[in-house]
Amino acid sequence: MDFLNISALLISLAALFSYLNYRFLKIPTTIGIMLIALCISLGLLFANMLGFSEFEHQAEKILRSVDFHEALMQGMLSFLLFAGAMHINLDDLLKQKWVVLFMATVGVLISTFLVGGLSWVVLNGLGLDMPMIYCLLFGALISPTDPIAVIGILKSAGVNKTLETKIAGESLFNDGVGVVIFLVLLGIATGQHQPSFESVSLLLLQEAGGGLVFGFLAGFLVFTMLRHVDNYQVEVLLTLALVMGGYALASAMHISGPIAMIIAGLVIGNHGRSLAMSDKTRKHLNTFWELIDEIMNAVLFVLIGMEILVLSFKGEYLLAALIIIPLVLFVRFISVGMPVMILRKFREFSPRVVQIMTWAGLRGGISVALALSLPLGPERDVLLAITYAVVVFSILVQGLTINVLISADDLKSE
């Protein structure tokens, strides 16, 4: 199928699943869409087992024509990160800067190596020979919480502003950091980079530091242009150019596009909206990016739910996933708890903040997309199946119960 037909099909499915969720399931939209897509996919697999294979084969053929990794990492991600960052209040973020910084850097590094080490023990203990570098790659792709999933859940959970800023800010930045760490480890695994301290440090500086500087400069340039325009059509078009052109240019320069879009989104969402726009433009800009965010999210979660049709699942893969899911949660608890324990000496935290941030640390499409970018081979099949299981558990179980956990702690009223 060509791009237009695939896009039409995905948006039509997203619209239909959104309608069904709104009418009957009445759960958060992204979770409802993914749940319906997953149930339909499982139904097609079951029908295939009964001998009715035509529909399953057609669906699989369509899905294989969609490059999930390319669609998300080189297309949808730039829009989603920019839109998410636009809703973060910079003043609130600066108040939580040390918490966000520690969790998005030290926390991700701790999680990458702990998950990598524990998964190496589990996988090799089950007879699934897995080199340590691939286990570390799994740790890097599964450690960052997905801002696309997290921010969507926070909108419906009703958490207090302080906790929301911590969770949303951390998920935005640890996503960018996690992608950079994954790319560094992938370069080592494929022999593109030398596993030396100097080469790794230089690559990290180029990717993360370059993305940060580029994102600020690109955002500031568009902010300056916005100050000289009072026409909402032109101003919306400028922000669209910033996202699409900026992400493409960052990728061409081999710097982190995700980090660049987060910084640019913060610049435009705060200084741009307050200092360079009229009320009319601000209203149109907010509406435009909220719609983009909702549409992209809906399509992404349709793809996540139906991706099971093209994955390879075996009994030992599922057993490994069942063991690794609680290990990932345990490591998340440690990687959040250590920075909080250190920072408690200097500031106060909400009650049970570690438990809540652990359970609110959802994984999503970015983890699946990164797993799909692994080199073809048996290692990829194993890690992709486990990643998908962790993501599905994260979104369905954690996503549907986080509101209960927050209500129990009476954190909505803080």
Image (spheres, grey):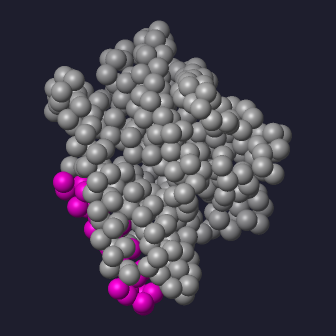
Q: Name the residue rendered at 37%, 14% in the picture.
A: 129
- Queried whether the magenta region covers residue 104, the answer comes back as no
Q: Residue furthest bottom?
A: 231
In terms of depth relative to the viewer, which is nearer, 155 or 277?
A: 277
The quarter of the displayed image where residue 62 is located: bottom left
Expressed as whole percent of the image width and height from the top left, the position of residue 142 reads 47, 34
The magenta stretch spans which residues? Answer: 228-253
322 on left or right of 200:
right
Note whether residue 9 is visible.
no
Residue 241 lies in magenta, yes or no?
yes
Instruction: Name the quadrant containing residue 246.
Output: bottom left
Return the residue nearer the eye: 91 or 351.
Answer: 91
Q: Is residue 126 above or below residue 174?
A: above
Give the residue at x 40% y 32%: 140
From the image, give the main secondary structure of the stretch colored magenta. helix
Q: Is residue 124 among what the camera can see? A: yes
